[in-house]
Image (cartoon, rainbow, N blue to C red):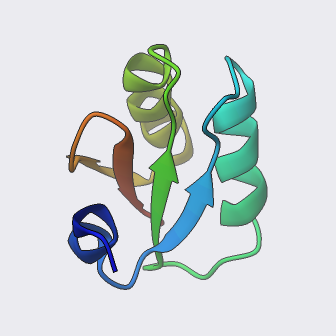
Amino acid sequence: MNAAAEEVGDAHIVDARGSSCPRPIIEIARVASKMNSGARLALISDDPATAIDLPAWCKMKGHKFLGRTNESFYLVELN
C-alpha cells in the first residue's frame, strides 16, 4: 500500500486522473449517488479545476469537504 492510500483510510477511491473539468466531479457524483450517508470518498484528480470545483460541489450538495491529503487526493464525507 502506498502512502496516499494509507492517508485515505476506508474511503472509497474515485480515480479521475487524466480527466478534465467537469469529468472529475461527474465521476464522484456518480459514485456518491450509490453510497450511504456518512461514507467517505477520495477523489484522485490531476485537474487543477478540481481544487475549486469539488468544494463548491460539496457545498451545493450538503456534503462535507474534508480537504486534500496531497496534491491529487481530495476527501469528502457524504451527508
Left or right of 31, for residue 2: left
Using the image as rendered, state which of residue 13 and residue 75 is in the foreground: 13
x, y percentage for residue 39? 47, 78
Q: How many numbered circles does the render carry?
A: 0
Q: Residue at x 73, y 46 (%)?
A: 27
Q: Image quadrant for the N terminus?
A: bottom left
Viewer-closest of 73 and 36: 73
| Residue 59 x %, y % | 42, 36
| Among the 4 quarters of the image, the one containing residue 21 | top right
Q: Quadrant of residue 23?
A: top right
Which of the two residues, 43 or 61, is positioned nearer the viewer here?
43
Percent of width and height locating residue 71: 27, 34
Along the line of sight, the residue nearer the viewer: 60 or 2: 2
Instruction: Examine the rendered structure and indicate whether residue 32 appears above or below residue 29.
Output: below
Q: Is residue 5 visible?
A: yes
Q: Residue at x 60, y 37 (%)?
A: 17
Q: Is residue 79 visible?
A: no
Q: Residue furthest front?
A: 2
Q: Is residue 68 left or right of residue 34?
A: left
Q: Position of residue 12 (x, y in %)?
A: 53, 74
Image: 11 above or below 56: below
Vertical arrangement, residue 35 with respect to residue 62, above or below = below
Residue for point 38% across, 85% down:
10
